[in-house]
Image (cartoon, grey):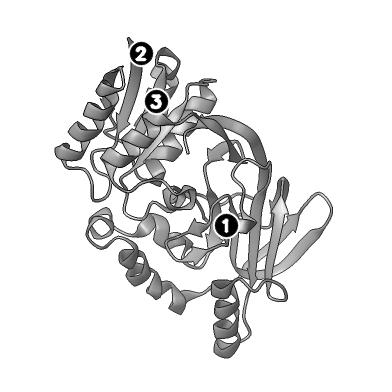
Amino acid sequence: MKKLLFIINPKAGLKKNKHYIDEAVSVFENAGYKVGIKYTKKRADGTDIAREYGNKADMIVCMGGDGTLNEVIQGMIEGDVTTPLGYIPAGSTNDFATSLGLKSDPKEEAEFIVSHEARPLDMGQFNGRYFVYTASAGIFTKTSYSTPQEMKNKLGHFAYILHGVRELFHIRRLKLKIELEDKTYEGKYIFAAINNATKVGGIMKLDKELVEFNDGVFELMLVEFPKGIIEFVKIAIKVLTQRFGGKVTFEHVKSARITDCTDIDWSLDGEKEKGQKVVNFKVIHDAVNFIY
């Protein structure tokens, strides 16, 4: 009998009710899998579980938010686990799941997982730490890891907006130097991000034509610091309407070296990463076998 490792974050988002778990397990069992359930209890549990048990299973499925997925993939890469991975999104925003077009209903997504083959998926590496879909700094970045879990569970995307509005009154300059393979950007920014998703932070969206999940590149976005409120509004409109150029930079990148950022905290898939003098980023092409 095939074995399925089911990693669940019971505190994530809106779908932590046992009813949803039972429905998913029933789908897996009907597909011929013997299901072993492991619950995360603290930060990094997903990493430890995936690293220790991943190669002993024929399939891994994680159920939780983007942070849970991040932990599981971290453990798979660290443990050289090549087992196919499925993801049932149960967080409060599920930006990456939305980008991939995954089902929001746990039973439907479980049915999708058992009926589809895994495909290669790229990952990002940030000073040795892996991330799934976004590394960002600047405005609204703190919101992703500082919004209380209870508020996120109740209000979803709206919680990020409410909690993030306060950052508008404390906009700081990010003085950065970003060295790419063929060019260098240097200046003062309010936002910097390296993404592999069409939706980031519950707010920002990218056209699906601009993003491929296993093409060996991520998307770099830089938003320059505005000179005043009028310019800020104009820049915000450009970002929301995806009119790149001028104050808004958009590039496909394989690697980057970012300096002058010791005092700048980053968000990796919604989890805080403290600032460092030098950030080395690179794409890990076809890092995991993912069902999407």
- Secondary structure under tag 1 reads helix
58 left or right of 218 in image: left
Tell me which numbered mark, 3 or 2, is placed earlier along the sequence.
Answer: 2
Q: What amino acid is at disc 1?
A: Lys
Q: Which residue has dot 1 on it? A: 208
Q: Which residue has dot 2 on it? A: 2
Distance CA(mark 3)–CA(mark 2): 11 Å
Q: What amino acid is at disc 3?
A: Ile
User: Which residue: 23% across, 46% down?
Assistant: 15
Viewer-nearest residue: 33 or 266: 33
Number of the front mark, 3 or 2: 2
Decide: is 4 above or below 263: above
Label drawn at residue 60: 3
- The answer to whether any part of residue 261 appears in the image is no
Can you give x and y, in whole percent of width and height, for residue 252 in the image? Answer: 71, 54
Query: Mark 3 packing: few (<14 Cα in 10 Å), some, or many (20+)?
Result: many
Q: What amino acid is at disc 2?
A: Lys
Distance CA(mark 1)–CA(mark 2): 35 Å
Label drawn at residue 289: none
User: Which residue: 49% across, 29% down?
Assistant: 117
User: Which residue: 23% across, 51% down?
Assistant: 14
- Quadrant of the image for the N terminus? top left
Mark 1 vs 2: CB contact within 8 A: no
- Secondary structure under tag 2 reads strand
Can you give x and y, in whole percent of width and height, for residue 189 in the image? Answer: 63, 69
